[in-house]
Image (tube, helix red, strand yellow):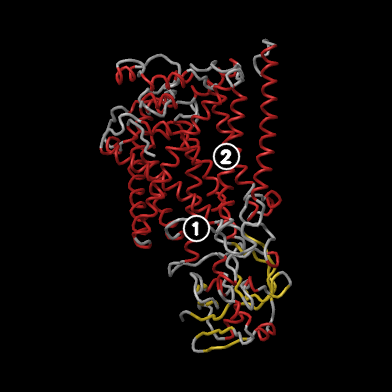
Amino acid sequence: MYEAQRALASPVRTPRMATVIGRLLGAAFLVCFGTGLYSHFLQDPLPWMRFATRPEFLYQFTQGTHIVAGILCFPLLLAKLYVIFPALFAWPPVKSFANVLERASIALFVGASLVQITIGLVNTYQWYPWPFPFRQVHFALGWVLIGLLAIHIGVKLPIIVANWRKKADAASRDDDDVDGGSAGGPGSELAPTAAHSLTPTDHLVDAASPNRAANPEEVRLWGTTRPGGITGRIINYIDSTPALPSRVSRRGFLATIGVSAVAIGGLTAGQTFAPLDAVNVFGPRKKGVGQQGVPVNRTSKQAKVAGLATDSTWVLTVVAAGTELTFTRAELEAMPQTEVTLPIACVEGWSQMAVWRGVRMMDLADAVGATPQTSFRLTSLEERGSFRMTDMGREYVRDPLTLVALELNGETLDLEHGYPARMIAPGRPGVLQTKWLSRIEAMDA
Amino acid sequence: MSVTTPGPAAQPRSTRTTDVPGSTTSRPTTSGRATDAHGPALSAGVGRAIRYGQITLLAVGLALLAWGAYVMFDTVRLPRITGLAIWIVAAIILHDAILAPVLFGAGLLLRRAGQKVPGTVIAVVQGTLVVGSMVSLIVVPILVAQNFTPNNPSILPLNYGLNLGIFWLVLLLLGSGLSVWLYLRARRANERPSSSQD
């Protein structure tokens, strides 16, 4: 096993690199967790919760960030796992009960992280090949992962502190590399890594670099410097392969991760971040693609509303404090109309700016005599679906930008966008911008 | 994947003892940085701060983990959680037993094949292949997903296969251009031994 570690040793597999990549990945996890919680509580608020309605693009920003940061976790997590991979072959496999717990926690951390970012990504493709409910599992795993992250940082804290800054001796070693000629060819820099100051028992240390003299640990384990048989031959084969110069190896690694992150982020973020729209070649959505130039999440066919929505007897029912009023579409059109420019921003990370025209929600609430403290429950025509009924807090009801929209981008609202009438409010997830509105009812006082 | 760091960091229990045996692995840097002025006092203070930090992080982490487990069992039915467990184990196997060894072997073969080539060129070739694989990892699931998505023209509306092909083409052009440039530069440098710097 020590041989396995040795074979895997590489100039990038150092505690310093684990710290450098680890803190980026940790930051990405925290960003995902924070924006994820925000999105969760917008959809399932605790009773006392009130939310900001400005800036109007707030949710577009937080959820777009959630998805971009999540995608960036792919290169970062794989890089982190690459750096620490030899630790898998730590020998002896376990040292103590605490050690067992720690290895188990890391196994769970790695597996759950891989699953979390994978289901998050594939969910944005609206493909659900897993045998569990996405939303609940993604939410619970978020807590689990942040807990495991805190435990992991706690356990590794001495290593992190020791490697937070670039070491003085590492810097001088780099200078030596420069003096020796960085492109000097293979084999020229096999020695420097062995000169590392940490002890060989620390697996993360590249003390186990190839082609170096026998060390006490090997002798202790095998009595010789090398196992025989096939294992020995494989090890010999690996050892006789030239290593890359350590500085080239380190910089190449960081550049590879950096370019991967820029490529993956840059070529997908255009689905929410307009300046990158031109290079959005891998995003699951494209700005401007969809009926009336706006992408659609749930279609009228999926919601099974086409019949009811196009029925000429459709009315919007508004209820508060014993008053119940119904409005036909013509009656809504006859009320004062307001035009707003608001993004529709989906939990899946895409967003689209659009011009909406319709009746202020505030005006409808006032029409049935609701107080400024009144929150409303919105009901869609659809028969089933997690968001058939949603709640709208008073901060949105009273916002002058919140509309019962009748028109989109200068045309009558398309059936796919919620004809005959839909809700549009600033800073809310698309699933709460209820389409095919049927009923708006005051919830309390 | 199970990973551990031998030494003080791996064992929360040992970190609580006043003077950690074996902590020499992590100490040199801390004390090394502090030596210029008031070394021992500062590093003792740092050591205590680290221990308090560790205890706090472990406590907070365990609480969050417990809460996450509660939320999981509260909202997801048991057979579904078993499904999740299978996915987690599969993810570990996929990475540790397949992806990582393949990557290791590929790097090994590449370095062997390019024994006579400067290290910078090998690094660029490796990097090019990894960047391409990383982007493919994100995009290939789209190609599969396109067979399963609902009838909605605004979901996955692009020609992702074509885009991926163009991406690889551009990437390989850039990668080989950079490789050739580095190769020629290294050869020129070798011909003129006086300029060892660049």
Percent x, y of residue A44:
46, 66
Q: Disc 2 to disc 1, how far (Cα)?
A: 23 Å
Q: Secondary structure at mark 1?
A: loop
Percent x, y of residue A424:
61, 71
Kind of residue at disc 2: Ser
- Residue A137 lies in quadrant: bottom left
Q: Residue tagged by mark 1?
A: A128
Percent x, y of residue A299:
59, 69
A361 is higher (above) or lower (below) than B198: below
**Residue displayed at 51% across by 60% down:** A39
Q: Is residue B38 visible?
A: no
A254 is higher (above) or lower (below) than A225: below
Q: Residue tagged by mark 2?
A: B133
Q: Chain of mark 2?
A: B
Q: Is residue A342 left or right of residue B55?
A: right
Q: Secondary structure at mark 2?
A: helix
